[in-house]
Image: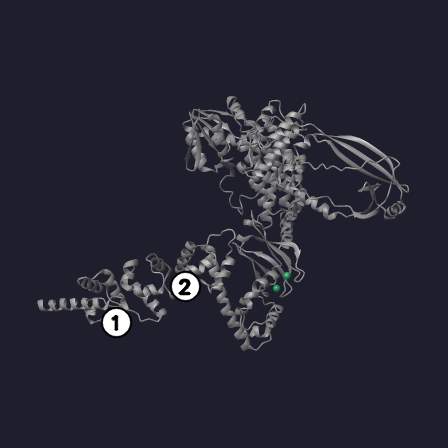
Amino acid sequence: MHLIVAEKNISAHRIAEILAGGHKVIEKKDAGVSTYSFGDMTTVGLRGHVVEVDFEPGYENWRSEKYTPRSLIDAKTIKVPSEKRIVSLLQKLARHADRVTIATDFDTEGELIGKEAYELVRAVNRDVKIDRARFSAITPQEIRSAFANTTDLDFALAAAGEARQSIDLMWGASLTRFISLAARRGGNNILSVGRVQSPTLTMIVDREKEIEKFVPEKYWQLGLLTEKAGEQIEARHTNGRFKDQKAAELARDRTKEPLVVSEVREGTKQDRSPSPFDTTTYIVAAARLGFSAANAMRIAEELYMNGYISYPRTDNTVYPASLDLNGVLATIRNSPFKKDVEWTIAHRRAEPTRGKKSSTDHPPIHPTGVATKEGIGDDAFRIYELVLRRFLATLAPDALWQTLKVNFDAGGETYTTTGGLLTEPGWHTVYPFSEAKETILPVFVTGEKLPIKKVNLDEKETLPPARYTQSKLIQRMEELGLGTKSTRHEVIAKLVSRKYVEGNPLRPTLVGCIVTEALEHNADAITRPDMTQTIESHMQQIKESRRTRDDVIEESRSMLHKAFDQLEANEQVIGDDIRDRTAEELNLGRCPACGGTLAIKHMRGSTQFIGCSRYPECTFNIGLPVTQWGWAVRTDDICEKHHLHFVRLVRKGARPWDIGCPLCHHINSNAESLTEIPSMDEALLEKARARHIYTVAEIARSEPEDLAKTLDMVPATAQKLKDEAGTVLEKLRRRSECRKFMRNHLIPRKGRSYAKIMGALKESGVTDLASLARANAATLQQAGIGENEARALLTEARITHNGQLLKGIGIPAVSLKKYIAAGIEGPEDFVTVGPEKLSTLTGMSAGTVNRHLALVCGYLHRPVPVTIPRARLEKGRKELLSVKGMTATVVDKFAVAGIINGESLIAANAKNLSAATGIEEEKILVYQTFMRKKQENAIIRI
Ligand SMILES: [Zn+2]
Ligand SMILES: [Zn+2]
């Protein structure tokens, strides 16, 4: 068998389809992993890396005395399978293979992934021939040619990847641990540091400092408005920016009619077609269409994997000679952009454009297949169109602009204006994504006199440098040699997810600044790009086999040890510095109750709240939703009324939840419940708030004497208020329990909010579990719940509510489970079923059942049934069943009514028994007669 290993499942599938050349491909699944077979060949897809590098066991404990953060530098690493099912399937297949072809992506990362597969195969099959297929696009032509010309795995290239992996792990893990421990942070809250990440963050922080330091300078700009042939034309003073206000005003005052055209200069400007896309220029162009860097790369990778475009990770901006440009044109002629393709073919330039960077691994990004909007979706199609049009533009002729520059004179002051006309649109015809704009001017003649409609003197200020956008930052990282084409966008995404930066353009957060500064002051090697650049150049040397992987890793170790010499010497200072300054980021302002400091507190688990620095003297606090809803942070906005920072809940992959001023929020969300307290009128409410009482719970829990003092009332009134608050609190508790129940049992759906459902149910009087359990399906349906859902919900509500009741009565949870399993849901059921049947149904002893029944009867204010030994019961039951025409159902009904044997049947009042059991009186009389006769016969026989 010939086994082909691809980088992902989707590429394995496509490669199989291509190589099968129209023959049927059979898909099989083994433990959830697909394989694709045809003839003698089988393809299988990895999931990128299927093994990961980790430290040897023993290094897991962060606080270990022996394994300090520094010890991670020299720690041995091991490879552990991270995708176990894929690894085991790969090895299962490899055992029987007589040839294995590695067909992972063709770059450092892909080569390393290929080498990992190579090692897994070798571990189970020492002799199998392993070769490598390299391609830049998953198209029939490229794939066939790659498999016809396989080579060996490039171990030097893979070694460069391995070196990077080891170095990144060693740097990231040791420094992250060191800084986090120094700052006493753990869990969700660690401070991560990374080899590429930290210098990148430093760039963003430095830019922010430049912006903060920036002192704007005033300047003045002079312009005028004239008119020709009904068109208004603006002209600028040739002086540009006036630094001196007086000079500007003087020039303005001298500007007098007539405005004389002093010179008309016509010219042409060549507008060169753009060069082919590499990863960076592609990301920049996609950003103009509104795609973030990470999103642009994700979509491009998908398009590549499906054969629509070539490999998107490339540094190359020159089409290699081997790339069949005519072939590409012929292919995309069938795309929805046929007209543009044909235009390009008809107007094709002699040579395609070329950029400055040429490398041999991959060609520039270009289209390789035909995609439609219906087939791939809007976003992917916009990216496909961008890549396709860029390709066309690189083959299209240059554009030509006709330029016009007109100079004017007005009282000795000189003005100028320019115009541009696209006379030959060239590449703009097929590439509408550039920003070039036409400005059409009327015809001017030298010496011509014109009116001055207006003279404008504008006071302006110089602007600070702009923050980095994601795409600008990627460009800058590339210039500095930070990261690689494959990792830059991931580094930025990491900085965002670790809350070091936010927004686009990117701004550092306070933590981002603090960590960067702490490192800068104490171990600047980590924050400067130099060291990272050095390591990147070492990678290149490994690729070219000029250095070995181990040699480079060793050198990196010694660099890191030097950094640790500095860091460890300053550990205390770094830790204190970070702790002091990050505490600040949680402070919201002054406590309204005591003037202490209010701050966000994150507790163990998922609890978070806002508390006072003077706790326990001051117990003022505001609850926050648990962290599942988002991690609470403060924002820069401040409430005008309470002078507190706003609070926001941030959650990965979700839009942040803005709480706003926590105190305003607290007051608003408690306003309604406070007014449910009967004696709470407007005046009292205002007074309570002025004395910092904002919730029902605060009133319910305070001592009447304290409450009386705080609210200036007599103790009796305070006691009444407290009692009422207690009642409301209980109501609120039940309401929130009901809401929680809804959340747990109603599947969330778009356009259906729990608040809305609860609101509608409240109208029908359903406010808690008890009333929900009593409600009928129609009420629920009116609140917007589907028929089947309503019925299921009611059943659940009944079981839950009754369960709670029974638990409250004193039935232990274990027994309760048995009752519910037996269909015994509520107290009433206990009574109707009766002790004997309860015991049979649940398998619990008669004693236990009777104990429970006594509790339930107590609750229902009913007499407790007399306890009767089981043997006697069984004997009685048999006796009753011997009556002619008697059924088990009837016997059960009798039992509930206390008729447990022949004797009690005979003694019963038939009319009463009929009423209690629903069995016809006549029948009962027949049973009684039969039983009486039977007993008489028995006596006679004796
Ligand atoms: Zn306080
Ligand atoms: Zn407020």
Amino acid carrying label 2: it is Arg
Q: Are marks 2 and 1 in contact (CB under 8 Å)?
A: no
- Does any atom of ligand 2 lie closer than 8 Å to the CB of label 2? no
* Residue 197 location (% of width, % of height): 62, 41
Q: Which numbered marker is on residue 912?
A: 1
Badge 1 amino acid: Asn
The residue under the point 27% across, 69% down is 915
Task: Look at the numbered disc 2 and give the secondary structure of its residue.
Answer: helix
Q: Residues within 10 Å of mark 2 (few under 14, many from 20)?
A: few
What residue lies at 68% left-to-right and 45% top-to-bottom?
A: 205
Q: Which mark is residue 700?
A: none
x, y percent for residue 682: 60, 71
411 vs 576, left or right, is: right
Picture quadrant of residue 354: top right
Locate residue 87, reporting x and y percent: 45, 34
Q: Ligand 1 closer than 8 Å to the CB at disc 1?
A: no
Q: How is the image coloured?
A: one colour
Horizontal side of 884 relative to 620 (left or right) equals left
Name the residue that disc number 2 marks: 774
Residue 639: give x, y in percent of width and height: 66, 59
Nearer the observer, 277 or 557: 277
Viewer-proximal residue among 330 and 160 = 330
Mark 2–mark 1 distance (CA, rounded to whole Å): 30 Å
Dividing the picture into quadrants, the one containing residue 226 is top right
Q: Considering depth in this image, is 623 or 462 the residue closer to the camera?
A: 462
Determine crowd level at label 1: few under 14, some 14-19, many 20+ residues with C-alpha closer than 10 A. Answer: few
Quadrant assignment for the C terminus: bottom left
Q: Residue furthest front?
A: 229
The quadrant of the picture showing ligand 2 is: bottom right
Q: Secondary structure at mark 1?
A: helix
Q: Would residue 364 be visible to someone looking at this image? A: no
